[in-house]
Structure formats: structure tokens, C-alpha cells
Image (cartoon, helix red, strand yellow):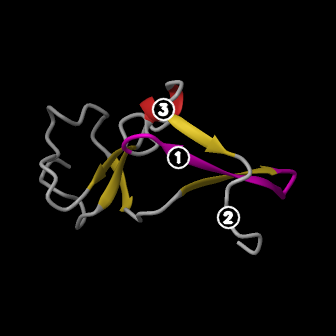
Amino acid sequence: MFAGDPMPRPYVAKPSCEGSSVGVKILLEGDNFRFTQENWTYGDSVLVEKYIHGRELTVAVLRGKALGVTELRVHSGFFDYENKYTAGRTDHLCPAPIPEDV
């Protein structure tokens, strides 16, 4: 686990046993972060996936029907735990300003 990057950068690393964006990191090419037992305090496993730069959109689904789309615009960084739960760090645009056909 702590032998270096688990996949080529850029990627997103998420603790396997956490929720609410706790411990999520986006690792870009050139970042100084390296996985070690000292700086990864979320257990011996990590979920990684390719990072795709773009807008943060979320859709509520009720009884199988998609409801309105909300865009989450953070003031700094990405939609991590602090930006999710600290007032004033993220603007919620509902409905999201997207074309109707999207």
C-alpha cells in the first residue's frame, strides 16, 4: 500500500472506510504528497480513481425519477469535507445553469 502512487496521476484517493469526503485527496502531476504510513491515517486500503476535471453536479433521485440538478461551486479547492460542511465555502446553484438538453 505505501510503495508510492497506486496509479498514474492525476487521480483521486478516497479512504475505503470513511464517508462524507473525509480524507479525500486529489493528486495531480507534480504534487509533493506521497503515501506513507505517517500521512495516510485511514487504514491499510485506499480507493483510487482517475481524476476528471470538471464541474461538480449532483442530482437527487426520488422513486426512480431524477429531480433538479444542483451545481456545487466551492470558493477554493474541491468539494471536500470542509467545503461540504463549513458555511459559506460552497455555493449551491439550484437549478444548475446547464442547457436543458443536458
Inter-mark Cα distance, 2 to 1: 14 Å
Left or right of 29, for residue 80: right
User: Which badge, 2 or 1, is on the more N-terminal residue?
Assistant: 1
Q: Helix or strand or loop: what does disc 1 sit on?
A: strand
Percent from the top left, x then y, of residue 74?
Answer: 47, 42
Magenta stretch holds residue 8 = no
x and y, in percent, of residue 71 in the image: 62, 51
Which type of secondary structure does the marked residue at label 3 adopt? loop
Which residue corresponds to mark 1? Answer: 73
Marks 1,3: beta carbons within 8 A: no
Residue at which label 2 appears: 98
Residue bearing the label numbered 3: 89
The part of the image, by quadrant, that contains residue 91 is top right
* Magenta residues (range): 62-77
Q: Amino acid at mark 3?
A: Arg
Residue at the spot 63% in from the left edge and 41% down from the top edge:
92
